[in-house]
Amino acid sequence: MKRIIILGYLILLNITGYCQKENFIEHVDKYTIIATETDSVTFPPYFKHPNEIDSISKIYSNCQMEARAIEEFQLKSYSVNVNVDSKDRIVRLQNGKEIRLSPNYQNGEVEYAFEKEFKDFGFLLFRVQWYEGNDYFLLDTKTGEKKYTIGRTYFSNDKNFVISINNDILAEYSYNGFQLFKIESNGKLNQIWKFSPNWAPENIKWVDNETLIVKGYYYAERLEKKTFYKMIKISER
């Protein structure tokens, strides 16, 4: 029985390796999203101090402890109106009002941790620790509204879109794939696309206001990691 399971897993890895080569076209709302193969590119660092963040990440094998340490560094490095109160986070909004962000234990949330400020867009990014796994949310600093995302977020320069990615194809504790939001004229985030491929998006960047490059990976035999690159184009129909 064990040999059958292992054989099935290796077959699945081979199928995954084949399917990653396939491009895709998605029609969602009034948009068409097309992914095609492209050449390798470099990606800008996600944080302003990537070396320091990398050093923190190497210290911890526990993701929750790592998130706390990154939060502490970020709050010391920048003037952000976020205070830590045990598992809660207290945020001062643009209008001066303070709100308390508390985990929803009934939904499996354990703790929030501030991660990054998108000052030009008016959002703060928080990591949400679950009992197993995690996700994120963007907090609107004008209204205090939360919008949950599957992972870290990337804003287009024209403030029309924000995309979130997460890679989790082995443990499967969290959603693996893409999540695209349209930023409406009132600043609200409207999800227009959520897609989970059989490969994992590891990194992504906006090339222009309608085009992204994503670095993906899958596992071949003996869990050998294989990387590739795709261009994602968003256009109105």
Image (cartoon, helix red, strand yellow):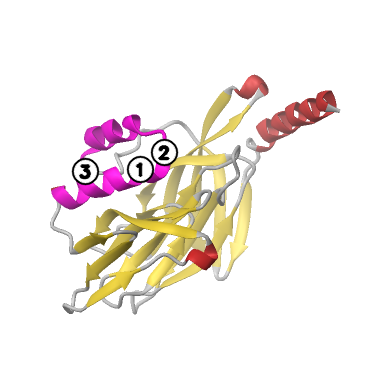
Dividing the image into 4 quarters, which one contains the C terminus? bottom right
* Tag 2 secondary structure: loop
Disc on the earlier residue, 2 or 3: 3
Label disc, if present, on residue 62 of the rendered structure = 2
- The answer to whether residue 14 is above or below residue 175 is above
Left or right? Give the position of 13 relative to 51. right
Tell me residue 195's x, y (percent): 59, 55
- The answer to whether residue 142 is above or below residue 62 is below
How far apart marks 2 and 3 lie (CA) works out to 23 Å
The residue under label 1 is 65
Q: What are the residue bounds of the magenta stretch?
A: 48-76
Q: Mark 1, residues whose alpha carbon is within 10 Å: few (<14), some, or many (≥20)?
A: some
Residue at figure coordinates x 28%, y 35% from the top left:
56
Q: What amino acid is found at the position of numbered circle 3 in the picture? A: Lys
Q: How many marks?
A: 3
Q: Are marks 3 and 1 in contact (CB under 8 Å)?
A: no
The residue under label 3 is 48
Q: Nearer the viewer, residue 22 or 151?
A: 151
The answer to whether residue 209 is seen in the rendering is no
Residue at figure coordinates x 77%, y 26% from the top left:
6
